[in-house]
Image (cartoon, grey):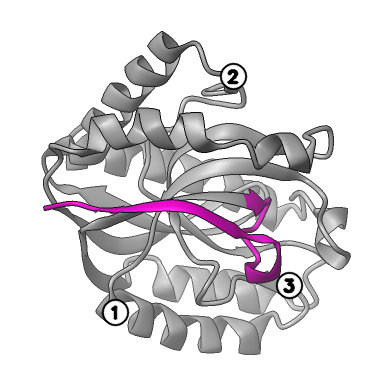
Amino acid sequence: MTDQELELRYDDMWAQSYQKLKQEEYYIDPNLKKRDDRMGITLRLSFGDDPLAQIDEFQDELKSICPEQYHYSQQALHMTVLSVISCSVNNDLIQLQNYQTYVDVIQEVLKDEKPFRIRHQGLTLGNAGLLIQGFPEADALNLLREKLRVAIHQSGVYHTLDTRYKIWSAHSTVMRYRERLVDRNAYLAFLEKSKSREFGVTTVGRLELVINDWCHSPEQTEMCASWELK
């Protein structure tokens, strides 16, 4: 997928959700007001130091506009490579902790993978929150995803790949709605002002397999394995 194709998809997400926001139509997640028992297994990427610093500054501004919402901590910020087992209250945590087969399959795919870059620029919206857009160089992330999908399917291991939707983007969610917006107009104005904001570039050299809750809260996240790309 080219940058132009990604941009069109992000713009479509923005257009649909922004219009709904203006009409006060957005999803408030009741699970964000308590311990979240929706657990799963995710292969994820982390941000580089420079983008993290820029996102931190952005989040300070965002929190001043809508402090009542759920804001991701620096430790929780991530980009999803694949949701191997989608988060659900029906997942047995003990069963999730039998993750070695996933580690073995993923490790075989990643052994020959090289680092790649993701440019973080602009905002888009979902029905449930605010996202930072990501643009991987040479479609490297989606090419990697396809290799992983093939390997996981061929292994016969249990998974729920692409059951919610087939992931195609390199976005990162920075805020989710857990209350009605106290000052919706101020939020909308902030979104317009920040729509094209730049957040720097991450050189992806490390991937992590984690057991996690819906928002990857640090207290609910367990590291299963990590890999360095060389």
Residue at mark 2 to residue at mark 3: CA–CA distance: 35 Å
Whether 46 is among the magenta residues is no
Residue at which label 2 appears: 158
Q: Which residues are magenta?
A: 212-230
Among numbered discs 1 and 2, the one appearing first in the sequence: 1
11 in relation to 223, above or below: above
Instruction: Inspect the image, locate mark 1, and give the three-letter code of the amino acid beneath it.
Output: Asp
Whether 220 is among the magenta residues is yes
Q: Quadrant of the N terminus?
A: top left
Q: Secondary structure at mark 1?
A: helix
Residue 47's x, y, as percent? 34, 67
Among numbered discs 1 and 3, the one appearing first in the sequence: 1
Q: Secondary structure at mark 2?
A: loop
Is residue 197 left or right of 37 when viewed as pictured?
left
Residue drawn at (49%, 48%) of the image: 14
Residue at which label 1 appears: 49
109 in relation to 222, above or below: above
Q: Secondary structure at mark 3?
A: loop
Residue at mark 1 to residue at mark 2: CA–CA distance: 35 Å
